[in-house]
Amino acid sequence: MIRRPICWFTSAALLVGTMPAPGFAQPGMPPQNAPATVPGQNPAAQAPGYSAPQLDSILAPVALYPDVLLTQVLMAAAYPLQIVEAYRWVRQPANRNLRGDALARALVSRNWDPSVKSLVPFPALLAQLNGNLTWLQQLGYAAVNQQAEVLDAVQRLRQQAVAAGNLRTTEQCVVRTEERIIYIEPPTPSVVYLPSYNPTTVYGAWAYPAYPPVYLPPPPGYVFSPALGGVLAFGTAIAVGALLWDIGRPQWGQRNIYINRDRYNAINVRRPQYRGGEVWHPSQTATYPTGGGGWRNPPGPTGGPGRGRAFGGPGGGQGHGQDFRQQGGHGQQQKGGQRGGQGRGRGQDN
């Protein structure tokens, strides 16, 4: 039984105004009047999808997260505006030092999806998600419409990292393989070390030159200690409370996301209780509603991340996507951050 590490990422913040306006169609995207999904139906049945190379590029920054954290990020990516609100909330002086049960109680009044609440103990992660909203929309779209393909992409990427010698058990994470499935877990269920890595390095030779892996560097102000020769780095240990952890996890064999309804509903206050099945499907009001309450391709610019840009949706095309290189992406060092998993940020712990 093999063991291996977990990984995570962070980045600088963007304002809500940087999020693409939902009213504008872009090249390579389905029309705004695309058919809405039927309530309770898997939206993947009606939505266009990303290709395998595109999914690998989009998933590259998060594929090495521990399984539970990965799942909670995929679920929360369906609610990008709530991510922005959570990022701003956690930066307020009155909330910045909340931990454990005190944090869970403070979140009761917030009308956010439980997956978003589950990320509040990880302020550096919220900073990265908030700072890369175009990519976050793509991730959420893929998670909602292509669960099976998303989980397949994660396993492909983990296998690449193992083959490159850059994914194995460390003091901060446990990596194990069972029946060709690679699991990544915290060494202790209640303590999570947040990994950071440069996908252009950790996965070795990249198979898709037209779609290089998206690199989202950590934001300034957070400390990451190098591991595995600097290919990976880990933030300060985060003690996760029972109420805000393990609300979902991958069902690798079934190629879907399992939702723990009891844990999910325990923090799902001020919102309708989740009464669906054990396979996660987001509420119809999440992220990109059409007039009928269904899902459509995320609005926004197009362009391949291989050119430092995020996708605007399946179909790609050359366009005016957000250039991540402006934030120190694709191997460029950001002030106070890390390059390729090496070095330290400034001052503040995760």
Image (cartoon, helix red, strand yellow):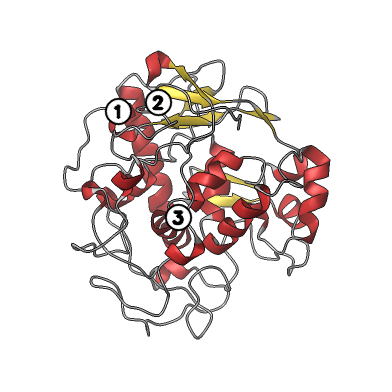
> Can you give x and y, in whole percent of width and height, for residue 288 in the image?
48, 72
Q: Earlier in the sequence, mark 3 or mark 1?
A: 3
Q: Amino acid at mark 2?
A: Gly
State if disc 1 and disc 2 touch (CB < 8 Å). Answer: yes
* Left-right relation of 294 to 45: right
* Left-right relation of 281 to 160: right
Q: Residues within 10 Å of mark 3 (few under 14, many from 20)?
A: many
State the separation of the CA atoms marked 2 and 1. Answer: 9 Å
Q: Which residue is mark 1?
A: 201
Is 346 located above or below residue 68 in the figure? above
Is 73 located above or below residue 299 in the figure? above
Q: Which residue is mark 3?
A: 147
> Can you give x and y, in whole percent of width and height, for residue 65 in the image?
50, 35
Q: Which residue is mark 2?
A: 341
> Can you give x and y, in whole percent of width and height, for residue 166 in the image?
37, 21
Q: Residues within 10 Å of mark 1 (few under 14, many from 20)?
A: many
Q: Front-most of 304 and 97?
A: 97
Q: Secondary structure at mark 1?
A: helix
* Left-right relation of 186 to 98: left
Q: Earlier in the sequence, mark 2 or mark 3?
A: 3
* Left-right relation of 139 to 308: right
Give the quarter of the image for residue 230: top left
Q: Amino acid at mark 1?
A: Thr
Is 270 located above or below residue 162 in the figure? below
Q: Amino acid at mark 3?
A: Gln
